[in-house]
Amino acid sequence: MNVNKRVSPSCDPLASCDSRKKREVANQAFPWSYICYPFSPKQSRPLDLGLANCLCSLSVRQSVEGLQDALANRSEGRRGFPEYRWESEGRVLDSCCSWFINGVNGAESVSRKDSLSVVSNLFATQGSWAPCSGVRSELGELGIVEFRDLNPNVNAFQRKFVNEVRRCEELEKTFAFLEQEITRSLSPSLRSPLQDPLLSPPAPQPRELLTIEEESERLARELREVSRNRDSIRAQLNQLCQYRGVLTQMHFLTASQTAAPPSFDPTGLAENRQDARLSFVAGVVHPWKVPAFERLLWRACRGYIIVDFREMEEKLEHPESGEMVQWTIFLISYWGDQIGQKVKKICDCFHTQTFPYSESQAEREQVLDGLKTRIEDIKSVMNETEQYLQQLLMRAVAVLPQWRVRVQKCKAIQMVLNLCSPSVTEKCLIAEAWCPVRQLPALQSALREGGRKSGSSVDSFYNRLPASTSPPTLFPTNAFTAGFQNIVDAYGVASYREVNPALYTIITFPFLFAVMFGDVGHGLLMTLAALWMVFEEKDPKLRNSTNEIWRMMFGGRYLILLMGLFSIYTGAIYNECFSRGLVVFPSSWHVGPHAKYYNWTDEVFRTNPFLTLDPNVTGVFTGPYPFGIDPIWGMASNHLTFLNSYKMKMSVIIGIIHMTFGVCLSFFNYVHFREISSVFLVLIPELFFMLCLFGYLIFMVIFKWVAYGPMHSNTAPSILIHFIDMFLFTENKANQDLYPGQMTVQKVLVVLALCSVPVLLLGKPIHEYITFKKKKRQAASRGERRPLLSENGSINAQQDDLDTKLQEEEEEFDGANVFMHQAIHTIEYCLGCISNTASYLRLWALSLAHAQLSEVLWVMLMSNSFSTTSYVGSIIMVVIFAFFAILTVAILLIMEGLSAFLHALRLHWVEFQNKFYSGTGYKLNPFAFASLICFSSTN
């Protein structure tokens, strides 16, 4: 092979371009590289067609001829690629492949997805399907690429490799028959579920696939033949055993029936009747049919028969159902041919098995001896057949898992090749796929390895170009982050390069759940259950369970772990453990100074179950509790009022901070997508509206907590009345101000909030209209100049396509649509700030419900068990504790936990994510053997 020009992946395709062309390429958002696959005319198969198994996102807009035309016209100033020619035996082949990748190089993190590239490749072929080289399975094993369908209008039955797919499907049917035979016929001592091989075998080569096909067909054919012979021998053995049972058990009955009575005159009877000879019909019938069979014989023959039934001593297999049945033997004695015909017809109607029954006792004994000999011979043949069948089944068990995996890989490869589009000359296959940018080195390694395994003497290289369609979304996750990412994806998959809420959900979701589920005891139980799942996560029985509910819980084990830990934390703040308080530090409230101040006696303490402690009395309240709620509030009669006020204000503060954080996250989306105008026309007005109204509400709550202590609690103003007067621009003399100048500050804040609404409503539509007019004037000033390339980078774009694109851009702006969209967003945001703030009150409501349910269980069950101190009381306590534990797990952990989980889910989806998250993307579905085999095993 003579190579005019050899290149390497480090070559610069712009080396021959002028400076203006280099600047045009540099202005593109994506770096350039290129890939080329050589073809050897001496070989009867393409060298790198197997790369279809490995390559990912391919997006080629050019045909082979278009690429060659681009190479030939490179000197005319058009964007093209270097020309590569391979000559051998007077034949010349121009082959050039390009991978164009849409992605943004940046840091990889969970908060923003990995950059993806759309890559394009041309595969040389000469009528044969892809060689199953090592490269074919490498990218399938890696699972880094997602192929795109280039034949959306082609029927599935008309694609190029449909015959190979059908061939693999036929093999799968053969494997299903083998597995069915293994399940049905394999010995129970050797029977075990078919497991996938520990080391995944590679995709088969064409010769290997042919060998698998021949061996599986031969094995299936032998199994069919042996199974058919085994079934035939077993049926014959059953019939002989039934016949032996008939002769054995009915022999003593016919000895008396065949003897003539003393007054019997055979000569005179022969003159009057010719059918006076006694005859027999013997056989077996299913025990369920005996009553109906006997009744019909009696009615049809009018009693001119003698019928006797006996059960067989051994159970035999039913020929149709395969179940073991204890057959019933019948012997019918009759006189006359007409009665005999009726009996035989009835026997046929009930599908009975009848056997010859001789009238001579000597003949019956002779037949019985012959039966015993034949039964022994058939049993020996049956044992040999069964042994040979077990050998065949063990061979199938040994090779079937490997065959199944390899054929599944081969089928997946052929289905991927069906997504490719053949070139005009039918010498190449054009494929498109998406690939993460960070996986490009692994892709290049696979290309080199594929070239080596396929015998190619020229290295393969790739090219990156921008794509016109939006790339899919890929977030690298692990066992810890997968559960949180699934929560976000259930709402909607992030658009390409959009901020991912899953990173923040790792903290906010367990915390909001714990606010509603706060209890040290319940959180500890949940943590222990999650820790067990975490420590046993490698157990195949737990990982491969088919129970959908268990798989969902097991997949979110780290989420449950964090929910349990956060519940322990919030439960410690609430000072609740199974509804009881924990006295970790001494209480800050003291009764002694109060009793001394009011001269309380022992009688007062005995007669009053509840006493009021006045914090204004010196020494009664010494300061805040070191951590959480003071345990003395658990004994107070007004503890519910105190906790309601505390939890309600806490819920509002958490909700406003959560929503404001969501609004701030939109800043990163605007900056990344270069929508700087939205920062000033959308983000800042939204923050003004949120902070001037609801941020000020948080300020008033915290200011009141700081400025008014126990000594001034009776004169503290109402925040709710101040907040209402703020919107009404009124002043309530009965409700004193929190600080001097409060009314002026509130009026300014309301005016700023109201001024942000028209900016939010009209700012973006006006800006888009001005930008559109500016672009239109710039386009008019350029005159008749037209771009040479379409925006997707295709060098084969027709001028009509470019003109059509320009016409679409001229008609792109729709003022009414833009204004309507922004009006809906403004109304939804302004009203949502109010409704979403109120929605966070569910934190308070569910926390109260959980605490009250826990207290009811304690008061109604466990507290009653402490009333008796005898031995009987101990037994009663154990029984009551069992009920308490069951109800705690069923109601408080499962039902209340599920309720809190769903409410936390709603707060994230509706109140948090809709502030910045669109969720209109689609997931990257890479071509990976592991996922295909796992899905097949699950099914």
Image (tube, grey):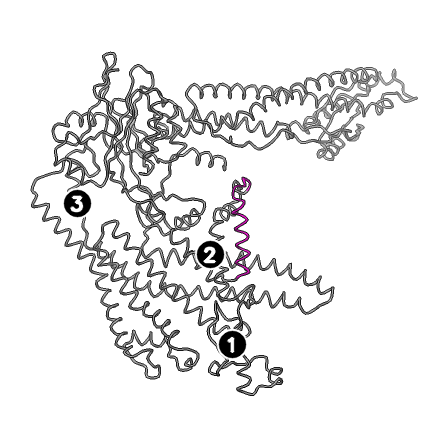
Residue positioned most to the right: 262
Question: Looking at the image, is mark 1 or mark 3 earlier in the sequence?
Answer: 1
Q: In the image, is residue 533 part of the stretch drawn in magenta?
A: yes
* Disc 3 element: helix
Task: Classify 610 as above or below 552.
Answer: below
Provide the residue span drawn in magenta. Answer: 520-541
How packed mark 3 is, by other alpha carbons closer than 10 Å (few <14, some 14-19, many 20 or more), is few
Q: Residue 726 lies in what quarter of the image?
A: bottom left
Residue type at mark 3 is Glu
Label 1–label 3 contact, CB within 8 A: no
Q: Residue at x 22, y 41 (%)?
A: 29
Q: Residue 425 lies in what quarter of the image?
A: top left
Task: Classify 287 as above or below 278.
Answer: below
- Compute the Cα span from label 2 to label 3: 47 Å
- Compute the Cα span from label 1 to label 2: 36 Å
In the rendered image, residue 542, in percent from the top left (x then y), is placed at 54, 43
Q: Which mark is residue 901?
A: 2
Left or right: residue 309 compared with residue 178:
right
The residue closer to the viewer here, 41 or 632, is: 632
Left or right: residue 359 compared with residue 895:
right
Q: Which mark is residue 589?
A: 1
Residue positioned most to the top: 89
Which residue is disc 3 drawn over? Answer: 809
Residue type at mark 2 is Phe
